[in-house]
Amino acid sequence: MPDFTKPEALHLMKILLPFWLALFSLLPSCHPPIAARQGSLTENSKEAPGKPYLLLISCDGFRWDYVERFQPQRLKDFIAKGVAAESMIPCYPSKTFPNHFSIATGMYPDHHGLVDNSFYSPNKKAEYRTRDREKVEDGSWYGGTPIWVQATKSGMVTASYFFVGSEADVQGIRPTYYHQYDGSVSNDDRVDAVLDWLKLPEKQRPHLITLYFSDMDDVGHRYGPHADEQLREALLKLDESLGRLFDGISATGLPVTTIIVSDHGMYAVPVDQLIATETVEDDDRYRTVSNGALIHFYLHDGVDKAAVFHDLKEKENHFRVYYTEEVPYFETPPTSENWGDIMAIPDAGWYFASQRTIGLRKTGGQKEIGEHGYDPGIKDLQGIFYANGPSIQKGLRIGSFKNIHVYPFMCKILGIDIPENVDGDLNILQGVLK
């Protein structure tokens, strides 16, 4: 070991330093196999080690027909040895945050309170937005009992490499291991973390893991659901990551059941069918929160509701205005004040956007994009449900079903109680189990 206090050694260090820096720059960036953040439960209870293992994978924006269209081999093999639904039907609105949390809780958005990607809470007098870290990590915005909370209450260590709500202290509980969302983290890093979690000693090993990929949603939004070349390329890359994950799980020898879902599908929107949000705004009378396929209007105190409704109806052009309680797409009569007083819903294939966004889209030369949020009964808006593992039947095909039913199914696999207030029904997927 050279003495770096001597002049000749210092000279040598100066010569070698650029080479060392160059070498380190070539090494792949990596993320810790266990999340930098940790919840309160650090060890499994005495009863937990005998319980099964469950991995829930969400592939955001993965439309129900992509596997048939693009033939990803590892996913096809996974499906052939397990169960596949014709499609999985999202809740209304068919947006990312409400539907991920409906999968996680077994409740309709009206009941868990996360009614859209962005909305206003009259009770909190604040807006929830997906990019607002303070709100996203505040458990008071999230109702229901997410699956990782229910598993934690049952004495199980849990882990999450991204899932809506997993960063928040819902009922004061977070997963044992979890990450703050960072879309730049590679799929390989996410897969490595899951496999490392499964290699932990039995006391620290999570029995429930959630994992999230955004690839198909990213490409679907950018190019639209008809861009076969771009969609195929994204799916085959994702398929490679999933294949490595499947192989790694198999190598552990653990009884892991894997469920693959998506929150929604994707609908084609021509750029010339974008509607300027500014045309329906009126700050003097109400607050406007737009999610593109749905605008929420929250009236200021003392404002005549009927008059606002009348004025908005006069502006209808490829969209419809409803009193919230009369919106036709709700599964149950809406009760949450987070919806607002009045809602504007564009026709499928039309979408609200700011004038600036519309201008940028048109000058960019692109003719079509992909969006979602519309009536979940439209097939293009529906997602996927695939399952495989020791507790799952092989080669079974089932019909389409609502995503709220995944939650009691997961509770059954894990051997934990199903909360009484969920909207999901175990009977819907009971027959999938061996």
Image (tube, helix red, strand yellow):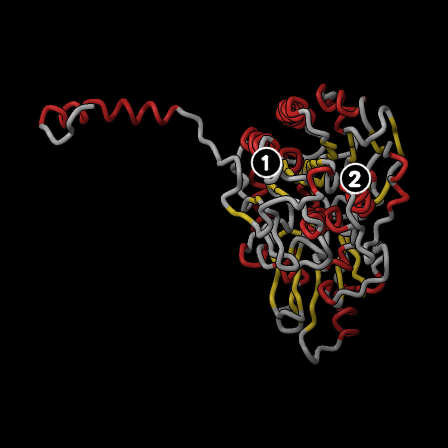
Query: Residue shown at 81%/26% (left/top)?
Result: 82
Q: Residue furthest bottom?
A: 302
Q: Residues within 10 Å of mark 1 (few under 14, many from 20)?
A: few
Question: Mark 1 belongs to which amino acid?
Answer: Gly
Q: Which label number is shown at residue 200?
A: none
Q: Residues within 10 Å of mark 2 (few under 14, many from 20)?
A: some
Query: Residue shown at 77%/29% (left/top)?
Result: 389
User: Dot 1 corresponds to which residue?
Assistant: 365
**Residue 223 image point, x, y percent:** 64, 33
State the separation of the CA atoms marked 2 and 1.
49 Å
Mark closer to the chain start, 2 or 1:
1
From the viewer's perspective, is residue 224 above or below residue 164? Answer: above
Query: Residue shown at 61%/48% (left/top)?
Result: 175
In the image, taking residue 326 as reference, residue 220 lies left or right, namely: left
**Residue 224 image point, x, y percent:** 68, 35
From the viewer's perspective, is residue 251 above or below residue 432? Answer: above
From the viewer's perspective, is residue 392 above or below residue 358? Answer: above
Note whether residue 109 is visible.
yes
Question: Mark 2 belongs to which amino acid?
Answer: Ile
**Residue 22 image point, x, y percent:** 31, 24
Q: Secondary structure at mark 2?
A: helix
Which quarter of the image is occupied by the N terminus?
Answer: top left
274 and 339: which one is in front? Answer: 339
User: Dot 2 corresponds to which residue?
Assistant: 413
218 and 355: which one is in front? Answer: 218
Q: Secondary structure at mark 1?
A: loop
Residue 343 position by quadrant? bottom right
**Residue 380 image point, x, y percent:** 79, 38
94 and 149: which one is in front? Answer: 149
Q: Nearer the viewer, mark 2 or mark 1?
A: 2
From the viewer's perspective, is residue 148 above or below residue 367? Answer: below
